[in-house]
Image: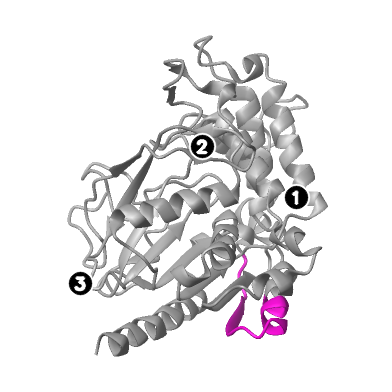
Amino acid sequence: MPDTLPTNSVGVVVPQIAQFDTPLTLSCGQTLSSYQLVYETYGELNQQASNAILICHALSGDHHAAGYHDMSDKKPGWWDSAIGPGKAIDTNLFFVVSLNNLGGCCGSTGPTSINPETNQIWGAHFPIVTVEDWVESQARLADQLGIQTFAAIVGGSLGGMQVLEWSIRFPDRLKAAAIIASAPKLSTQNIAFNEVARQSIRRDPEFHDGNYLDQKTVPTNGLGLARMLGHITYLSDDAMGTKFGRQMRHDAYQYNYGIEFEVESYLRYQGEAFTKRFDANTYMLMTKALDYFDPAAQTNGDLAAVLSRAQCEFLLVSFTTDWRFAPERSEEIVNALVKAGKHVSYAKIEAAEGHDAFLFPIPRYMNALSSFLTRVAKRLTTEVK
């Protein structure tokens, strides 16, 4: 945490809780009789409630997208580089809402919450949730906040899938959509990566079929391995080579299975750190939501047909070294939107960071997002007049 807050920071923020007592029927057929969503807001909602932007988080994200919770925080929210006064998502212009999705482990109702029907921790009994379920719950949060229409909805990776679903499910409730480093559905390879991650967790002896909290333990080995695997797919070969190369911890090979290369140390650290802040059942749920997402299945695989429902304008952004969601996947969406006659802009950004590039303040990327949202803000001003 800096000694003084930067002028372009949203500052110290306090998470809020929205409680819902209207039952939510999920895609899996089960119903949540009640639930809560934790969220943060940055900026001010105008009198017309027309300047709101919704931020949809990726697999391991949460509601804390910008600012600090306390002056002792070591780092700000996960997208602080993009959200704040004068930044790409400008809080001088917009009222920004960021939430932790259902099934999360950062305050929203999920596997670590208490099941009101049994008064026990949900654990493995928490139902499977989907991107469609998240969007439905997000719309209910918007209703509670008095927001009928979002000026824009923005998300990267799994967050981008939520943005795409918004444009199809609630086409009259958003005016602009920014979909970053995302895809219209997972490739077979990505589903395979997710399955290996889940099996790493499930085969940990401490998993106990997902009821590990009842056993007062945590499957740290399995969850750590899942995170290590995932982290490799978020980086590019060039980025890993530049950062680590074949740097070694010792002057010569030790001929054992301890840490010898710096990249090994880095991955172990990432895996261990992740187990201290994330829940294994939530990781399982989030990866399943990724696997299930396929809006074109509604129209026999015709993405343009399902996107014909959209009414907003779109910005698509991809990154050259992203092999988890390669540029070709964003271009599938772009081509379908063009075929459907929609207004779409596309930026393919040169970046060495791989899939994680969407989290970095890469100048051309931030300029593209800023320009897109500035146009949105100008239209809001015209509409008010």
What amino acid is at disc 3?
A: Gln
Q: Magenta segment: does it hold 79?
A: no
Q: Say which residue appears at 41% left-offset and 22% top-offset.
A: 116
Name the residue beneath numbered marker 2: 103
Q: Amino acid at mark 1?
A: Asn
In percent of width and height, residue 94 lies at 30, 71
Label 1 crowd (10 A; few <14 / some 14-19 / many >=20): some
Check disc 3 and report its element: helix, strand or loop. loop
Of tags 3 and 2, the one toward the viewer is 3
Label 1 to label 3: alpha-carbon separation: 44 Å
Asked whether residue 324 appears in the rendered view, the answer is yes
Q: Which residue is mark 3?
A: 47
Q: Which residue is located at x 66 percent, y 86 percent?
A: 341
| Vertical order, 57 against 127 (above or below) | below
Cα–Cα span, label 2 and label 1: 21 Å
State the extent of the magenta-drawn residues as a range: 334-352
Q: Nearer the viewer, mark 1 or mark 3?
A: 3
The residue tagged 1 is: 190
Q: Nearer the viewer, mark 2 or mark 1?
A: 2
Q: Look at 54% across and 40% down and name the residue there.
A: 25
